[in-house]
Image: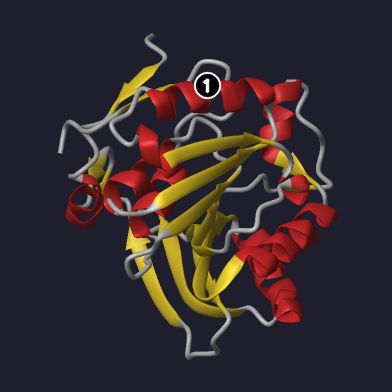
Amino acid sequence: MSSIFKFKQFEVDQRGCAMKINTDGVLLAALAECNSPKRILDIGTGTGVIALMLAQRFAHAHLEAVEIDEEASKTADLNFKSSIFSNRLTINHTPIEQYNTTDKFDLIVSNPPYFVNDLKNFEEKKGIARHTNEEFFNDLLIKVNSLLTENGSFWFVLPIKQAEQLIKNASIYRLSVSKQIHLHSDESKPEFRRIVCLKRKITTPIHEHFYIYESEKVYTKTYKNLLKDFFLNY
């Protein structure tokens, strides 16, 4: 099986990346909203697919990506450099807590590791990509708070339990929920992930439900319409 995943406007080589392209990241990149962002930050970029999708969506934005795993960051760098958006994409191989910049970002996104204090994966690289500890989420919020513009937004995707904990902790930094998108496999299934938007301004949160399948192996029209500008078969 080829390691190359082809999109309409770019390709993603997944070699060296423990966490491959997945539904969580693709939906986050397609659903995150921001009004004409000038600077975007992708925390934990992995293959770089989220950053590449955002580069396609926001043609005038410069994107910074942060990745802790060295091999994944090298792969993301190659994917960035081979894309038509290469002049707007930069990779930083560093833990987010050690990422230093004087820039502020209008949009920050993250598909972070989420098994908090859980049994560690025996595959070390996949363990780094999937597992974390409670301090990581606090470090993440500290960094987001320091890097987000006054009117900026922070979008992330997590399982429900971890998303609700991050929302709770965000209030410490005066970051409030603006929108929550509840992801379901289909209308008969409970929510399995949540995409959340945090902002500095307090508003009444918007709740939406997003369904991926209308029946077994048949995608909803909403899903196909959302990704038609990216996937070759839509």
The location of residue 35, given as percent across then percent down, is 33, 70
Residue that lies at the very extreme toward the front in this rendered image = 102
- Residue at 68%, 60% in the rendered image: 162
| Mark 1: few/some/many CA within 10 Å (<14, 14-19, 20+) | many
Does the image show residue 87?
Answer: yes
Does the image show residue 18?
Answer: no
Considering depth in this image, is 114 or 45 the residue closer to the camera? 45
The location of residue 128, given as percent across then percent down, is 73, 32
Q: Is residue 106 left or right of residue 147?
A: left
Which residue position is annotated with label 1? 75
Considering depth in this image, is 83 or 31 the residue closer to the camera? 83
- Residue at 48%, 84% in the rendered image: 205
The location of residue 99, given as percent across then percent down, is 71, 47
Dot 1 amino acid type: Thr
The location of residue 90, given as percent across then percent down, is 50, 38
Placement of the C terminus among the 4 image quadrants? top left
Placement of the N terminus among the 4 image quadrants? top left
